[in-house]
Every structure is written in C-alpha cells, then in structure tokens.
Image: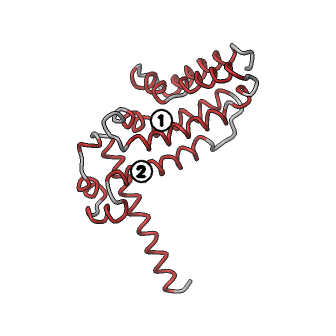
Amino acid sequence: MSPRVYRQSARANAVQDTERQIVDALIALLEERWFDEFTLDDIAAAAGTTRQTVIRRFGSKAGVLSAMAAQMDVSIRAQRWSTPAESVADIVALLTDDYERTGDILVRTLGQEARIPEFAAVLDRGRKGHREWIEDMFRAWLDKLDGQSRADRFAQLLAQTDVWTWHLLRRAQEHSAAETRRLMTQAIERLLREDGTN
C-alpha cells in the first residue's frame, strides 16, 4: 500500500470513528434525556468533538438521529437474522436477545414520537423491518393460512412480538430475561396452536 493510499484509508477510518462516536453520544443522551432537552453542542461534547464537526458530518440533530436509525437497523437485522430459527422458542430467543440490547432505547424513542416529528421516519423504518422479520420468521405458520385468517394472525404476531410486550414483562412486571422469553414463547405457541399450525 502506497503512503498516499494509506493516509486516505487512515483518514476514512478516522471519519468513521468520529461518526460512530457522535451516534453513540446521541444514544447515550437519549437514554437519559428527551430529544428536545439537549442540543447539538451537548451531542458534540458527549462525543468529544465540536458542534461544527457534528454539522459537517450530519447537518443537524435530525441527521444524527437518522444515522442512529440506520446503525440500529443494521445491528437489529444482524442480530435477528443471525442464526436459523426453526421453533417458536428459537424465534423468541432471537427477538428477546435483541430487545435486551435495544429495547429500552426503542421504548424511550417511541415515547417521544408524538412530540418529535423527526422520529416518524426513524420509527417507520423500524416498524417496516419488524414486519419483514415477522413474515420471514413465521412464514411456515402464516403460509398455512389465507385471507382474513392470515391477516389476523399476522396482526396478532406483531402485537405479541412488539417491544412494548417485552417492556411490560421485563420492566413493568420485572420478570427476568429468561422468564420474559418463556412467557412470550408460551403466548405465541398458544396463538399458533389455535390454527393447528404448531
């Protein structure tokens, strides 16, 4: 590798590192405060950089938010499609492992949706990804149904696997991660047995 190519590669890596630090700073701030309670300066300070760097990389707070959504989308997809899932228990394990990492920030983000217009695109992207995941993971059960029965079962699976369901069991009712996984698995298995598809 020539010195010039090496310098360009090092510079590109430094830019990526800075962008990752800025996004991580936003996530850390969102875990403690509402989106409209902190500024670009706060994000920059938490990332150990300057406001101008944040603007140069992302343009605005909404731009950092969009980058966070993209990063979370990649991470969630990598987690949820990481291993083959053949049973409901396998599927729920993939889901709850993901929620253990991202569930709290997702719930906090959802709690700001009505107040912060910029959150709509972020959350719509997440909902679309979740629907794709349900279609993929539960295809063997869903494809045995048709018409309204399939649509109803899909809607019920969306509700049973929603982050709010995890949050209710894990945080509000204070079940352990293992108990939450067991309870969600039982509920989904019971739902699927109604069709004789389990």
Quadrant (top left, top right, bottom left, bottom right) of the N terminus = bottom right
Mark 2 neighbour class, 10 Å CA radius: few under 14, some 14 to 19, many 20 or more: some
Name the residue rendered at 28%, 63% in the picture: 49
Q: The disc labelled 1 sits on which kind of residue?
A: Glu
**Image: 7 above or below 79:** below
Q: Is residue 19 left or right of residue 142?
A: left
Front-lying residue, 186 or 152 = 152
**How far is the residue under mark 2 from the one under mark 1?**
22 Å
Residue indicated by mark 1: 100
Q: List x then y, in percent, for residue 87.
A: 69, 28
Name of the residue lying farthest toward the front: 147
Name the residue rendered at 48%, 27% in the picture: 166
Residue indicated by mark 2: 66
Mark 1 neighbour class, 10 Å CA radius: few under 14, some 14 to 19, many 20 or more: few
Name the residue rendered at 44%, 25% in the picture: 170
Q: List x then y, in percent, for residue 84.
A: 69, 39
**Image: 49 above or below 32:** below
Front-lying residue, 176 or 76 = 76
Front-lying residue, 99 or 142 = 142
Considering the numbered disc 1 on the image, is that residue within a helix, a strand or a loop? helix
Q: List x then y, in percent, for residue 126.
A: 50, 40
Q: Is residue 125 left or right of residue 132?
A: left
Q: List x then y, in percent, for residue 155.
A: 58, 24
Q: The disc labelled 2 sits on which kind of residue?
A: Ser
Which mark, by number, is residue 181? none
Front-lying residue, 39 or 118 = 118
Considering the numbered disc 2 on the image, is that residue within a helix, a strand or a loop? helix
Q: Is residue 47 left or right of residue 156?
A: left
Which comes sooner in the sequence, label 2 or label 1?
Answer: 2
